[in-house]
Amino acid sequence: MTTTKREPVTRVAVLIPTYNERDNLPGIVARVRASVPDADVIVLDDNSPDGTGEVAGALAADDAHVHVLHRRGKEGLGKAYLAGFEFALGEGYDAAVEMDADGSHQPEQLPDLLRALAGADVAIGARWVRGGQVRNWPLRRKVLSVGANVYTKVLLGMKVNDATAGFRAYRASALRAMDLEGVESQGYCFQIDLTLRAVRGGLTVVEVPITFVEREVGVSKMGGSIVREALTNVTKWGIEHRTNQVKQAARRLRGRPAPVEERP
């Protein structure tokens, strides 16, 4: 895919959703600040009962590059990021980064993502591409992730290899073009949802190889309901995609122009 050079990205908001991450947050914020000193960190705390919000507030009080959005409660990854996007767009940032608080996304690789935006609208930190890798995952989880991404890629007809990846950077212009008001996905399906919107919206999406490291502190938020949501939604979108392909083929046979495929 050929890329067109975009406007420079100067103001960056690194969005970090948190729920019970008080032990991880100070370290990850410090690493982000060291890796991209000019960027701002926006902590999106869902009223963590372990006091993560208070820890975030203390970090913000000591550093003008750290901000906190105190949310009313645990509403899911999707709504947290949507709130972060709204804040970033409202404050005039050029780009917004999605990043986990648990250390699985290494801040030291963030400059690579941001450099990729020079020729793209969306840069995904990808595990399942040449040069990407995962550390400290059991075989079962690797198989689940690879299988989910292959299923998504084939069913939705996308060329993206790691559509479920949660370490990614969006240009502000891309977020404005993606009809975020229509997003309803909450768990990790949120990442697939936004990837699909970007691809179908004609945006340039690139994948940057990263090393994903399993958390050492705290508990993973991945649960059965998150997996079911992703499976249900991807299957529904896939059926719609295949149905649209059949309709477009029929229109071509009748000599009529095919309509543009709708976003999810």
Image (tube, helix red, strand yellow):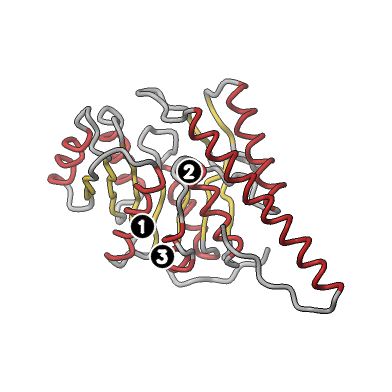
Q: Quadrant of residue 251?
A: bottom right
Which amino acid, mark 3?
Answer: Ala
Please determine whether, in this image, residue 88 is positioned above or below residue 133.
below
Which amino acid, mark 2?
Answer: Gly
The dot on residue 172 is 3
Quadrant position of the N terminus in the picture: bottom right
Q: Nearer the viewer, residue 82 or 16?
A: 82
Q: CA distance from mark 2 to mark 3?
A: 17 Å
Which amino acid, mark 1?
Answer: Phe
Which of discs 1 and 3 lies nearer the camera? The answer is: 1
Position in image of residue 23 (x %, y %): 27, 27
**Which residue is disc 2 drawn over?**
166
**Which residue is disc 1 drawn over?**
85
- Residue that lies at the very extreme toward the right in this rendered image: 253
Marks 3 and 2: in contact by CB < 8 Å? no
Count of number-bearing discs: 3
Q: CA distance from mark 2 to mark 1?
A: 14 Å
Q: Within 10 Å of the Cα at label 2, are there few (<14), some (14-19), or many (20+) other Cα atoms?
A: many
Position in image of residue 114 (x %, y %): 45, 56
Q: CA distance from mark 1 to mark 3?
A: 9 Å
**Residue at x 40%, y 23% (from the top left corner):** 216
Q: Quadrant of residue 19?
A: top left
